[in-house]
Amino acid sequence: MNIGPVDIPNRFALAPLAGISCTAFRLLCKENGAGLIYTQMIDAELISGKTPHEVKAFLNICDRERPVTVQLIGAEKNILVKAVHAVEPYADFIDLNVGCIEEDYLAKGCGAALLKDPPQLASLLRAMVKATKKPVTAKIRIGWDNQHINGVTIAQIIEDAGAAAVCVHGRTADQGYAGKVNWTIMNQIKQKIHIPVIANGDVTSYDQGLELLTKTGCDLVMIGREAQHRPWVFSKDSVDIKQQILRFIDLYEQYEQRQEPVEVADHVYWMLRDFKTTEDTKKVHLITSIPRIRRYVNRLS
Ligand SMILES: Cc1cc2nc3c(=O)[nH]c(=O)nc-3n(C[C@H](O)[C@H](O)[C@H](O)COP(=O)(O)O)c2cc1C
């Protein structure tokens, strides 16, 4: 499977997850089989103001997690182009966020607001494509609300602008994360455009991922919230949850620049969701050092 010139080793992608996708988390998803890794969204204004050294440290991308898509959010052409230049040495793909529903971003015309302004979306993407030799992609929703489902048109605009792929979260902006994912629109998009399409929404297992690929005909399937709790969702094998959590802590200590116990505790708590224990696992948040979090996990039964 290829997107543009880049080989993707399988059909599973890790979704961009703001506040969750640290390097250790991305690496654990990769080790468990995610074929394409997205960073969380990165504010174009913020990143374009950094020095090359700061950008490298901020992204903290390891060669082992490649291919990696760096996702940008923005709506000002000049700033987005600057951001593209800033991240392109480290990115295998550069993605534009066309699905974010945070009020602050919508107010600035970013994220899902672009679904309501196709000419602006086309103009931004054309500028991004022109600014880099790296393939540019976009991640969209199927429309603004039920009365304005324009995912097919939006995907065609993205293709015409020169993008290498499009990812579709099968909900409207208005739905947020509620209600059902619309497979029909994902399928229509796949039929209408020629670049690869990534289907996204509500996949909670490897088999469901395969099912979504079959139902939509899409090229890749992307998993987000389930990976937050089970970075091993990309694997068809069963795993030892405790070993996975200990591996996460190792990766965090080895590769993360921040070394924040709070961040480790969050991930440990999320990954303990399906671990059978009588302990109140929320208490992991009270532990203030990473070695002690490791000891806590080791003792869990
Ligand atoms: C906590 C959280 C953070 C997210 N951050 C991003 C983001 O940075 N960029 C983006 O395009 N989508 C973001 N999303 C949306 C997911 O990438 C994905 O499209 C959505 O969760 C649906 O997929 P899922 O059902 O597999 O989670 C986020 C979702 C959640 C729950």
Image: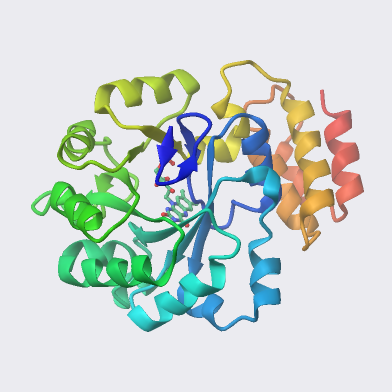
**230 relative to 198 in the view: left or right:** right
| Quadrant assignment, res 31 | top right
Question: In the figure, 251 relative to 127: above or below?
Answer: above
Residue 96, percent across and down? 38, 61
**Quadrant (top left/top right/bottom left/bottom right) for the N terminus:** top left
Question: In the figure, 287 relative to 230: above or below?
Answer: below
Image point (77%, 27%), residue name: 242
Residue 97, percent across and down? 38, 60
Q: Which colour scheme is used?
A: rainbow
Residue 196, percent across and down? 32, 40
**Quadrant (top left/top right/bottom left/bottom right) for the C terminus:** top right
Between residues 178 and 154, which one lies in front from this camera angle? 154
Residue 52, percent across and down? 65, 76
Between residues 102 and 90, which one lies in front from this camera angle? 90
Between residues 49 and 204, which one lies in front from this camera angle? 49
Image point (71%, 26%), residue name: 241
Residue placed furthest toward the left: 147
Between residues 32 and 262, which one lies in front from this camera angle? 32
Image point (50%, 36%), residue name: 8
| Quadrant assignment, res 78 | bottom left
Query: Looking at the image, how many numbered discs can be counted on the residues?
Result: 0
Q: Can residue 15 be seen in this view?
A: yes
Image point (35%, 70%), residue name: 130
**148 relative to 298 in the view: left or right:** left
**189 relative to 255 in the view: left or right:** left
Q: Can residue 143 be seen in this view?
A: no
